[in-house]
Amino acid sequence: MASLVAMLESYENLIAGKIENPMLTKEDYDQTDAKELHFMDIKWCLASVVRRA
């Protein structure tokens, strides 16, 4: 249940335009790898499906 809540919060923040984290630097963002991005894409898709249901 906690992961579902986290997904919904992430999706709501995306809709609200709050996708930046002021604590992260450019170097932090550069360290994101392809597998991580793929996982994040799946997470957003699941959140979108749950939101529509």
Image (tube, grey):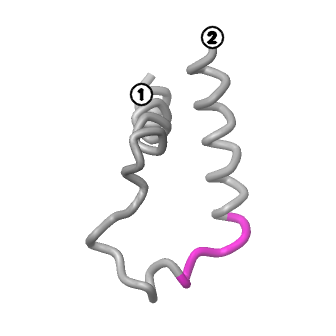
Q: Secondary structure at mark 1?
A: helix
Q: Amino acid at mark 2?
A: Ala
- For this orientation, the residue located farthest to the top is 53
Magenta span has 32? yes
User: On the rendered structure, is 41 left or right of 51?
Assistant: right
Q: Residue at x 65, y 32 (%)?
A: 46
User: On the rendered structure, is 30 left or right of 16?
Assistant: right
Q: Which residue is mark 1?
A: 5
Give how far across and how far down residue 7 sits, in percent: 49, 35
Q: CA distance from mark 1 to mark 2?
A: 14 Å
Say if 51 sits above or below 47 in the image. above
Q: Residue at x 55, y 84 (%)?
A: 30
Quadrant (top left, top right, bottom left, bottom right) of the N terminus: top left
Q: Which residue is mark 2?
A: 53
Magenta span has 14? no
User: On the rendered structure, is 50 left or right of 15?
Assistant: right
Quadrant (top left, top right, bottom left, bottom right) of the C terminus: top right
- For this orientation, the residue located farthest to the left is 23
Q: Residues within 10 Å of mark 2 (few under 14, many from 20)?
A: few
Which region of the structure is painted magenta? 30-35
